[in-house]
Image (tube, helix red, strand yellow):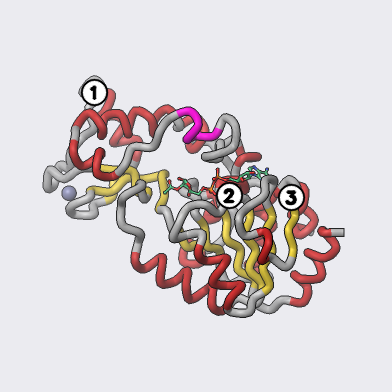
Amino acid sequence: TARTRLGELIAAAQRIVPFTGAGISTECGIPDFRSPGGLWTRNAPVYFDEFIASQAARNECWRGRFALDSAFGTARPGRGHHALAALWREGKSPGVITQNIDNLHQASGIDDSCVIELHGNTTYALCLDCDTRFELDWVREQFDASGGEAPACPRCHGFIKSATVSFGQAMPVEAMRRAEQLTLSADLFVAIGSSLVVWPAAGFPLMAQQNGARLVILNRDPTEFDAIADLVIRHDIGDVLAPWVE
Ligand code: OAD
Ligand code: ZN
């Protein structure tokens, strides 16, 4: 079966690089983006140029973010996260490349330095001008006290934004460099829970495959890259990966 084949590939591999998307966190109570009920099916994303251009867009962006507090604020790592953490602890995997912004790979015990976040992190905020970090509790206090106005940076008056990468915003240069390095060092690359439609992130599975790594795609729905994968598993992520925790 596909699971047996996955076990064989993992056993044979020296350097496994998991590449994760929102599907690994759905069992943790965080919706993905494009499945029925996904975030982008309920609220359109606020683009970076809109965020920069208007206070109303910044207010709306923060309102939307705080509406997700109940999911992001309480979520704990799931079976997929724990399985990848086990591979990392065993030294089978040098680190995880993730499109996720939920901090759950770090929460599963993988060292911060081994989690490469391509789209940032929504569990804290940054000033877009001076890069000062702000905790969300503080942002929320300011937001609530002003009747729903997104606060400006107390140091430089810059805009404060969740530390995620919005559409139209530059990719984090260092994370991209490290993701490329990890990808080119992989002998087994496992794309987990991603629709693989958002670029440049979606380029990494392709890069790994072209560089000679085995490519596994574990995702409930088909993806554009299934045709070039060595193994495609269209099942529930937690169910498939749970055995690797033992
Ligand atoms: P998507 O919502 O596009 O895709 C998630 C995939 O996970 C879907 O194809 C689901 O079928 C699958 N899935 C969900 N739960 C699953 C489960 N329990 N078992 C197996 N498969 C499951 O999310 P991403 O691919 O992560 O970027 O989205 C990529 C980027 O688009 C995000 O990082 C975000 C978004 O816009 C930015 O905001 C910049
Ligand atoms: Zn500032």
Which residue is drawn at the image coordinates 61% and 72% (left, top)? 209
- Of helix, strand and loop, which one carries label 2? loop
- Of helix, strand and loop, which one carries label 3? loop
Mark closest to the chain's N terminus, 2 or 1: 1
Whether the residues at callouts 3 and 1 have beta carbons within 8 Å, the answer is: no
104 or 138: which is nearer to us?
104
Numbered tag placed on residue 234 in the rendering: 3
186 or 243: which is nearer to us?
186
- What kind of residue is marked 2? Ser
Numbered tag placed on residue 145 in the rendering: 1
> Is residue 39 part of the magenta span, yes or no?
yes
37 w.r.t. 104: above or below: above
- Of helix, strand and loop, which one carries label 1? helix
23 relative to 124 in the view: left or right: right
**Where's residue 190, x and y in %?**
65, 63
Which residue is drawn at the image coordinates 49% and 46% (left, top)? 102
192 relative to 57 in the view: left or right: right
**Where's residue 49, x and y in %?**
24, 44
133 relative to 246 in the view: left or right: left
**Where's residue 173, x and y in %?**
34, 66
Mark closest to the chain's N terminus, 3 or 2: 2
Q: Is mark 3 within 8 Å of ligand 1?
A: yes
- What kind of residue is marked 1? Ala
